[in-house]
Amino acid sequence: MTSPTLDAGADGAPPARGRSADAPSRSAAGRTDGRPGSRLRTRRRLEGGAVTVGSVLAALVWISPLILLVVSALRPLSDFLSNGPVSWPQELTLANFPEAWEAGQFGTAYLNSTILLLVKVPLGVLVASLLAYALAKLEFPFRNVILFTVVLGMTIPIYIAIVPLFTMLRGIGMTDSIAGIIPPYIAFGLPLQVLILQAFFRRVPEELLEAARIDGAGDVRIFARVVLPLSVPALVTVAILDGVATWNELFLALSLLSSEENRTIPLGLLNFQGQFATNYTGLAAGILIAVVPILVLYMLLQKYIVGGLTAGATKG
Amino acid sequence: MSTTTPRRAHASSPARRAVLAGALALPGAAALASCASGVGTTSTADGLTLLNYEDIDAATLLREQLDAFAGDSGIRTTLDTVPGSGAAQFPDKLRTRILGGNAPDVWQIWGGQIGQPFVEAGLTLDLAPYYDEYGWEETLSPAGVDGMTFLGERHGAPINVASLGAWCNARIFEEAGAAVPTTYDELEAANEAILASGVTPGGFGGKYGWHIMRLYEYLLEVTAGPDLHDALLQGEESWDQAAVVESFDLFRTWNDRGWITPGALGVAPADAEQGFVQGTSAYTISGPWIEGQYILPSGQPQEEFATFLLPTGHETVRHSGFVEGLMISSTSGAPDDAAALIDRLLSPPVQEALQNTQSAALGAPPDAEQFPLSAQWVEIRETSEIYTIQDQAFPKAVADSYFSVQSKVLQGDASPAEAARDMQQIVSEWKDQR
Amino acid sequence: MIAQTIDRTPRGAGPVGASGATARPSTPRLRLLPFAFAAPALLLYLGFLVWPALQALWISLTDWDGLSDQQSFIGLGNYAAMLEDPVVGIAAWNNVLWALVTIALPMTLGLLLAVVLNRKSRTSPVLRTIFYAPAVLPLVSIASIWAWLYDPSDGAINTILGAVGLSGLEQAWLGQDSTALWSVMIPAVWVRTGFPMLLYLAALQSIPDELYEAASMDGATRWQQFWRITVPSLKDTHYIVLALSLIESFKVFDLVYAMTYGGPGYSTQVMGTWMYANVFQYFEAGYGTAIAVVITLVAIAAGIPYVRSQVKSS
């Protein structure tokens, strides 16, 4: 029996399954001889081409703010002002970048954000995976209650905790410090991480764990030597998502960090906005300085994000 | 400075401490982070902290002076700045720091209802002893000292006495055939002429409310006159009256006739204020700091710019103004050092080095050659009095309600009469609460 | 850490105990190890999320200003005041609008994009990356970029409208009550569409081809196939996208704070920003916290079904 080819139509019909376009196709008109007419094939190809073109155009429009940003950052202010924001630059320059770097004191902000990232993310993922493993594989009284309570945390907006956190940190002298905001960051990151990781860990086959146990391994070793290595994709995904969230976090940083030397990138950018109001090209350069690294990292790591999200979240 | 002892009882419960100890017993992490960001208690051994809202150019000049001071006196000062949004966000940042036990030793703040809450909360020192010690009564402007007197006590030492007036691009005026207005009607005529020549007359940014408020309060002064204006600000007279309605009507008219920045409400003040230097607007309402901040760096010849007192048509022609000063934290570990720092900063040579064109230091008027326009204001102030700028007349919550009323009027969502009634309600509620 | 290996009763049929019988122990012995594993996370969670949240409940029942030492219990006074505060009404309504738009639009757009991009072609992965990219940027930078685009005189949007002859549509996007919130929602949708797109892309893979084949043979058009096969088969994903978007929507703060600061007037205030204003600007920590409590309770209530479903299915 000939199986029809299914092309993706621009009207949202079901997608292709990777079969070649030459396979016999069935049109809605109901030809039954199994072989497409060349007209139909051409039409399908044209449709496919149109969809591609359409989606490329859509993507360009989608990303146009960033393109505009890059172009503006590379032109001198006078050029921007005289020709307008959407014009092609007559002149290109790199001078906006050092100016913006200085004014925004991005050096400090980068340092702080990086430290925060390098400390908080591995720590958070470790702590989360320990709990997730315990909930997934180790016997535990009140297991479901604990899981529920922890995951429920993901519905809680961070700003309800701000005044108590503030008072708490002040009581131990840890306000306005990167170290001080790490515990709340970890706490608020736990719900989603635990949810994803415990779902993942549950799927580790019991036989593997049994085998290791029979070999005499204790739970810790099982966790470290068997489960973790198997879970690298999930861990990496969770780490990346957490990293992005940590890097971009504003509210806690805004409320708990105050001095210049402890600013993170989002704070630095807020501050920078104030300084560079009408220096549009400088502003563009500053924004780029703040986001290019994360965009680059994203490009490099995006398949992990995609992979992890799609694996972890769409459990039927 | 040392950390404050926990004020809340529950902060010291053993269970809490155990939790915290457990959480923070991740030694590598905490140590690494704390080393890198210099966390921990900032002790006086590190010197003083000064917090203000200068932009980077002014901050650079200030740091030079602080270094010089450190060289002379051995007192080191770290400067932190929160530039850009002015009174809308700086007080919050200051408050956050203080709440966090990380109060700066000295900070700069505006007078009126912006600085007062800090005094009322007991966060500042009464500077009377230092006034005596350093003789500030004689060396600082009386208007400034007044502005830094809260509830009868001098909790601040004034650094700026700012007068607000119109700062304009003289070339645009000339090209439009508009003369510097001496009456309110002439100002309206000038607006029309400038608009006809293709330029937006008034550059105002309403994003945080206070910049466009400067236009409104001027209009109120025009329609209500000095006495009524003051009474209104104190809540002694009702806002629900003809003069106020007229002022809101004028306010709307300015917007409807295209005399202010299009879409002003969404524009940030810093954006709009520079317009007259760049030629996208003809004038703005601002103060002498503008000369050093925007006019000089623009590199354009000084003759292109002018400043004038906004005409009100009353016998006493007043202008809006405000005072900024320095306060010392009541929790500072080194108040005497802080006072010495303040004295140094307020001394005429330092004020001049900082290019402060609105200095409260009587010995440091703006240099007429370098800052001709600011120097003009010293003269203007001899005949024109200052009334307190409106966003300092009200505490922030009230000021925000007030900005909201302005916003509605500009958008045509509230009629001038309704706005006047709303204002009356806002002010009377505030007065009742006090 | 000592791993205590006691006789474990393995899941499923397991090895027989030394006595030869698979009798269960009379009292399950409490093992320390799981607690050791769970302790760091639980301590942090309880200490830095749960406990502060509970404290917030207490603070919301006082008139604390956040600054001084005095704090008096005023019962539900703050909540009563909220009922009379017109800004709370504005903020709550804005949160509703925000939720509706930032759930529906990304979901729809994400689904459409997923369907279109679900083809093996060289461009698809690149396009996927592009559509997801805004999600990794800090919201502050998004706010900066879009505020710049929305600038009434020098912004790209008005410039382009003017250039294509639509200058009648030019306006002060962020400077008018009527357009301000919607203007902030657009970048929010821009940011949030990538995630549903990825989820849908993955889920589309698992719809069996036979369904489509059979439908084609019955003469169904592709449009019909989309609505009768694709959309229903993605039920689970719809649920996840909806739930996660809803949960996320209650947390809105960054974009509004950075783009409009709650203005013009109060028109773009949301509960989060109004809470911030009250706590950090007006010296009303008690009242502000009450606002936070209200939105949190609503968020928890809205999120519980999803959380339950996730926990139950494990």
Image: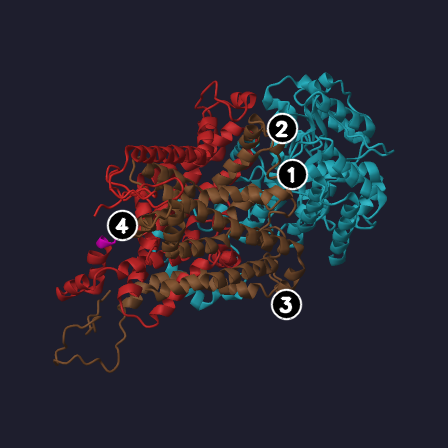
Chain colours: A red, B cyan, C brown
Disc 2 to disc 4, how far (Cα)? 52 Å
Q: Residue at x 78, y 20 (%)?
A: B179
Which chain letter matches label 3? C
Report the disc number at residue B204.
none
* Secondary structure category for the residue under label 2: loop
Report x, y in % for residue B392. 70, 44
The mark found on residue A233 in the picture is 4
What amino acid does circle 1 point to? Leu
Q: Is B55 on the left or on the right of B217, as rendered?
A: left
- The label on residue C74 is 3
Residue C160: quarter of image:
top right
Asked whether the residues under marks 3 and 4 belong to the same chain, the reply is: no
Report the magenta residues as a range: A229-234
Q: Nearer the viewer, residue C192 or C84?
A: C192
Locate the C terminus of chain B by quadrant: bottom right
Residue under label 2, please give it.
B274
Q: Chain of mark 2?
A: B
Q: What's the CA distance linking mark 3 and mark 4?
A: 51 Å
**In terms of secondary structure, what is the magenta stretch mainly?**
helix
Name which residue type carries label 2: Gln
Q: CA distance from mark 1 to mark 3?
A: 38 Å
Q: Dot 4, crowdedness within 10 Å: few (<14), some or many (≥20)? A: some
Which class describes the residues within 10 Å of circle 3: few (<14), some (14-19), or many (20+)? some
Q: Which residue is mark 1?
A: B265
In the rendered image, residue B38, in percent from the top left (x then y), is placed at 43, 45
Q: Is residue C296 left or right of residue B24?
A: right
Residue for point 82% across, 50% down: B236
Measured along the vertical axis of the image, is residue C144 above or below residue C272?
above
Dot in front, 2 or 1: 1
Q: Characterize the local packing of mark 1: few (<14), some (14-19) or many (20 or more) Cα atoms within 10 angstroms.
A: many
Instruction: Please check whether the numbered discs 3 and 2 fall on a single chain.
Output: no
